[in-house]
Amino acid sequence: MISAGDFRKGVTFELDGQVYTIVDFMHVKPGKGAAFVRTKLKNVVTGAVVEKTFSPTEKFPEAIIERKEMQYLYNDGTLYYFMDMDTYDQVPLNYEKVEEAIKYLKENMFAIIKFYKGEAFSVEPPNFVELTVTETEPGFKGDTATNAMKPATVETGATFMVPLFVNTGDVIRIDTRTGEYMSRV
């Protein structure tokens, strides 16, 4: 059991038969009245975000989320297949479960799959990925003086904002937590 007074970002718990992870929280101590905890919760299965307030003494069962590193194999049009490298079992996931991560993943890359009670519900890409730029406007020598950015499409089909000096064929490093360009490799 976890009490609302111990809430921190990333903590998962069960509430009304659903599993939530804490996106944001704030302990509030008003000048008059009892203290409370204001939270922003994300349903780990549906992805819906809700805001709720709790008394710091309320207790909830902690949800155990299993994290397993798996290899992304391929997409057959509707499902995305990941393989457990220990058992060689393949796990097919639909687009809703891989939506946030798939723009960073190439075939044969590794990702963290999150499971709750044996059911996969989310994919987490590595913190940094290196992807080849497949399409962007040409850069010019000396385009480094300003912080101007331009769109670039990478091999996964996603588009990121990159500095003007990045050209088609360059390999770039992307921070998957923010979706921002880090450097040219």
Image (cartoon, rainbow, N blue to C red):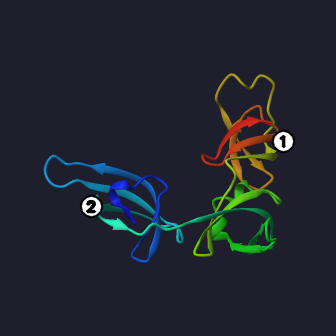
35 or 92: nearer the viewer: 35
Q: Nearer the viewer, mark 2 or mark 1?
A: 2
Secondary structure found at label 1 = loop
Provide residue 149's location: percent of width, then percent of height.
Answer: 67, 36
12 sits left or right of 59 in the view: right
Provide residue 100's location: percent of width, then percent of height.
Answer: 63, 59
59 or 41: nearer the viewer: 59
Task: Say which quarter of the image contains residue 140.
Answer: top right
Q: Amino acid at mark 1?
A: Thr
Q: Are marks 2 and 1 in contact (CB under 8 Å)?
A: no
Q: Which numbered disc flags the more N-terminal residue, 2 or 1?
A: 2
- The CA span between labels 2 and 1 is 54 Å
Provide residue 173's location: percent of width, then percent of height.
Answer: 74, 41
11 or 125: nearer the viewer: 11
Task: Say which quarter of the image contains residue 86.
Answer: bottom right
The residue under the point 72% across, 54% down is 104
Task: Say which quarter of the image contains residue 175.
Answer: top right
Secondary structure found at label 2 = loop
The residue under the point 39% across, 55% down is 7
According to the image, label 2 marks what residue? 55
The residue under the point 74% across, 73% down is 91
According to the image, label 1 marks what residue? 168
Q: Assign the N terminus to one quadrant of the image.
A: bottom left
Provide residue 161's location: percent of width, then percent of height.
Answer: 67, 42
